[in-house]
Image (spheres, rainbow, N blue to C red):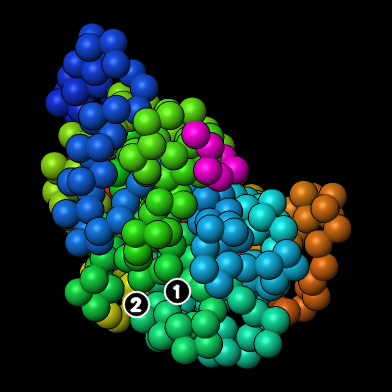
């Protein structure tokens, strides 16, 4: 077969599909017992009590901010309160802040972890800062415990977008359990996939009940003991997952550790093969895990050496010809996106030097969940190093 190195490969096993078909045959497609079972198993696996499954990671981010402003929440945020967010972000890490009526303040990221360091956070915090949206990028993270402790002391809420880092363990604790609200995505290319799906994790029962009401129409179903099942205690959305997704996710969770370890081993082999090659000439630098992290890698991000910055587009076109798919790191420096201009968000471009550098020199390639063959490894190495 001819060589191809796609961003996404087929990550479903026969058992995953069998579980999905079983749900379809039961004709109970909507959120039901499988979702509950998955929430329970997820909670046990990640050692975090309050977990609620949703239809996407974006919905999880949306609910985090709508819970923070909800009148049922004690010390809720008020319209116009400021929330820090890295300029290197995903669209739906940002927009829920604005949709909830809060004010985003973009901050830069560290070049090593692609996430804001505690120093960057401290430099940007003001009396107006009431929340921080922190993104754990592609399996990595910054000093999240320090950021959490710093935020806690100042009564600043921490939302942890862990949509790209499911399975990473920082100082013996899974990422996605550090925030007041933490979010996960089960989209196709992610470490655990249900095709589509997400999870929101919080720290106490009252937040959990708010999230539960927001997930389904503002209903009090399964929240209070009222007999009247058409009781609406809150505003709401419909962000319920399908039980089909929950069944697939349950099946994947059983082999998550194996998938994480295969991905890690593939990454190590690829990095080592590149560095050992005769053609290795520091063409790029690699994304190294935080020293306290046991990473669950999403992909292989590469930063082209400065001497090749201007050749990046030509190089990526060449890789495309070699059938190696690439994409930007998250979505680059997000302040450059047309949607920012459309919604007239304010910022000073010079404040995001590192985010811009990651956009200018960075890209990523996929990381398969099945062992890469020696033949493909050789071909990948030769193609990736073909830049002068
Ligand atoms: C950092 C980050 N947050 C949120 C999301 C949204 O997740 P979903 O695609 O499940 O809506 C993504 C998507 O990849 C992401 O990379």
Residue beneath label 2, please? 290
Residue name at image x 23 percent, y 49 percent: 42
Q: Main secondary structure of the magenta part?
A: loop
Residue beneath label 1, please? 113
- The span shown in magenta is 231-236
On the question of residue 380 being in view, the answer is no
- The reply to whether the C-beta atoms of the residues labelled 1 and 2 are less than 8 Å apart is yes
Residue name at image x 62 percent, y 53 percent: 96
Would you call the spot at circle 1 few (<14 residues within 10 Å), some (14-19), or many (20 or more)? many
Closer to the camera in the image, 212 or 12: 212
Would you call the spot at circle 2 few (<14 residues within 10 Å), some (14-19), or many (20 or more)? some
Ranked by sequence position, the earlier of labels 1 and 2 is 1
Task: Assess whether residue 233 is covered by the magenta stretch.
Answer: yes
The answer to whether the beta carbon of the residue marked 1 is less than 8 Å from any atom of ligand 1 is no
Quadrant in the rendering for residue 35: top left
Closer to the camera in the image, 182 or 51: 51
- Tell me if 222 is positioned left or right of 107 in this view: left
- How far from the left and from the top, in percent, is residue 56? 46, 40
- Tell me if 331 is positioned left or right of 230 in this view: right
């Amino acid at each position: 077969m001819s060589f191809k190195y796609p961003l996404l490969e087929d990550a479903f096993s026969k058992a995953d599909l069998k579980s999905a078909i079983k749900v379809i045959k039961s004709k109970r497609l909507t959120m039901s017992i499988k979702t509950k079972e998955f929430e329970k198993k997820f909670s046990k696996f990640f050692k975090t009590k309050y977990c609620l499954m949703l239809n996407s990671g974006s919905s999880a981010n949306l609910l985090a901010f709508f819970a923070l402003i909800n009148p049922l929440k004690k010390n809720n945020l008020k319209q116009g309160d400021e929330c820090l967010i890295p300029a290197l972000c995903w669209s739906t890490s940002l927009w829920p802040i604005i949709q909830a009526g809060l004010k985003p303040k973009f901050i830069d990221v560290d070049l090593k972890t692609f996430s804001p360091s505690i120093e960057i956070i401290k430099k940007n915090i003001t009396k107006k800062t009431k929340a921080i949206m922190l993104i754990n990028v592609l399996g990595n993270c910054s000093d999240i415990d320090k950021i959490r402790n710093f935020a806690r002391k100042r009564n600043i809420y921490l939302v942890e977008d862990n949509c790209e880092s499911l399975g990473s363990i920082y100082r013996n604790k899974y990422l996605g359990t550090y925030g007041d609200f933490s979010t996960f995505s089960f989209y196709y290319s992610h470490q655990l996939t249900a095709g589509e799906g997400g999870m929101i994790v919080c720290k106490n029962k009252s937040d959990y009940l708010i999230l539960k009401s927001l997930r389904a129409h503002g209903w009090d179903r399964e929240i209070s003991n009222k007999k009247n099942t058409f009781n609406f205690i809150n505003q709401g959305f419909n962000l319920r997952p399908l039980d089909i997704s929950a069944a697939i996710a349950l099946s994947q969770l059983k082999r998550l550790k194996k998938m994480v370890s295969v991905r890690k081993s593939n990454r190590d082999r690829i990095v080592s093969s590149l560095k050992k090659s005769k053609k290795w000439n520091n063409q790029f630098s690699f994304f190294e895990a935080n020293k306290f992290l046991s990473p669950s890698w999403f992909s292989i991000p590469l930063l082209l050496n400065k001497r090749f910055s201007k050749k990046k587009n030509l190089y990526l076109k060449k890789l495309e010809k070699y059938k190696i798919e690439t994409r930007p790191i998250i979505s680059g420096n997000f302040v450059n996106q047309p949607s920012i201009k459309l919604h007239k968000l304010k910022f000073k471009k010079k404040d995001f030097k590192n985010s811009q550098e990651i956009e200018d020199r960075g890209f990523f390639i996929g990381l398969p969940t099945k062992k890469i063959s020696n033949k493909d490894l050789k071909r990948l190495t030769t193609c990736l190093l073909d830049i002068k």
